[in-house]
Every structure is written in C-alpha cells, then in structure tokens.
C-alpha cells in the first residue's frame, strides 16, 4: 500500500461525509473552500478527519500498517519492523503522519501549494 493511496482513500471518504450545519456540503469540500478563502480551515473539521483516518487504519492488517508507516517521513527515518515495534505506537504515529499528509493534500487541492 502506498501513502498516496491512503491519503486519496481518506479524502474520498471525507468527500462523502457531510458537515453538521451544512448538510449539502461534504467535510472535504468545506475544508477546501475554507483554505481557498482564508488559507486555513476551522479546527472542528480536524476531529472528522481524525475519525476517518482511524477508521481507515482499522481496515488495515498489521503488516499493511507497518508497510504504510515505513513510507512516512518518520518511518523512513526510523523504519518499524513487525518483530520489534509495538503496533499501537505504529498506529498513533501513522495517524499523525496521515493527518499531515491529508492537510498537505487539502492545501494542494485548494491551489494554495
């Protein structure tokens, strides 16, 4: 599994999730719109993004988690091996890495990068 694939899958899911107050707009389109207007987005959407990241990670096998983690910046600096790493630690690090990658993707989609 590639990191770019994971980011794409999560962004696609966010594009199907609607915002609380704006039922007609997806979380992803709202984030993109906010970035275009103010070069930032409301932190209340971070919870939704984190929820979708956790949901995505839950669908992966432990081996897929290790492989995906090792494609992140942190994983390239200190690769994780299934025989020595604690999976919960890998999952937490992977969540943070994916959150950063999703944010980068949002800025790129908004045309701000």
Image: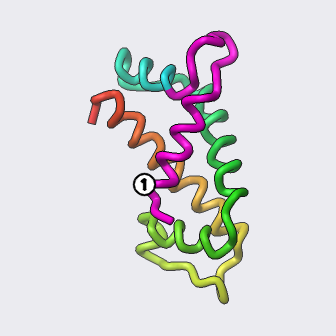
Coloring basis for residues: rainbow
Residue 78 spot, x, y in % from top left: 47, 78
Q: Position of residue 67 (x, y in %)?
A: 53, 73
Going 42% across and 18% down the picture, which residue do you hit?
33
From the image, tell me which residue sits under label 1: 4
Q: Is residue 58 above or below residue 50?
A: below
Q: Nearer the viewer, residue 86 or 3?
A: 3
Seen at 47% across and 54% down, the residue is 5
Foreground of the two, 99 or 19: 19
Q: Is residue 4 above or below residue 108?
A: below
**Residue 3: % across, % down:** 46, 59
Mark 1 closeness class: few <14, some 14–19, many ≥20 residues within 10 Å:
some
Q: Which residues are magenta?
A: 1-28
Q: Residue 89: x, y in percent?
A: 67, 68
Query: From the image, which quarter does the C terminus lie in?
Result: top left
Q: Is residue 44 magenta?
A: no
- Magenta stretch holds residue 14: yes
Residue visible at 60% across and 12% down in the picture: 24
- Rendered image quadrant of residue 13: top right
SS for tag 1?
A: helix
Question: Quarter of the image holding residue 93?
Answer: bottom right
What residue appears at the point 54 percent right and 23 percent down from the top-left corner?
42
Image vertical order of residue 96 relative to residue 113, above or below: below
Count every numbered label the image shows and give the total.
1
């Amino acid at each position: 599994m590639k990191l770019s694939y994971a980011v794409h899958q999560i962004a696609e899911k966010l594009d199907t999730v609607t915002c609380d107050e704006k039922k007609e707009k997806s979380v992803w389109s709202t984030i993109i719109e906010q970035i275009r207007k103010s070069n930032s987005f409301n932190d209340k959407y971070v919870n939704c993004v984190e929820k979708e990241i956790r949901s995505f990670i839950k669908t992966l096998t432990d081996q897929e988690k290790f492989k995906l983690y090792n494609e992140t910046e942190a994983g390239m600096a200190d690769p994780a091996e299934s025989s020595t790493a604690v999976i919960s630690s890998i999952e937490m690090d992977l969540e943070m890495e994916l959150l950063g990658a999703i944010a980068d993707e949002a800025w790129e989609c908004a045309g701000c990068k």
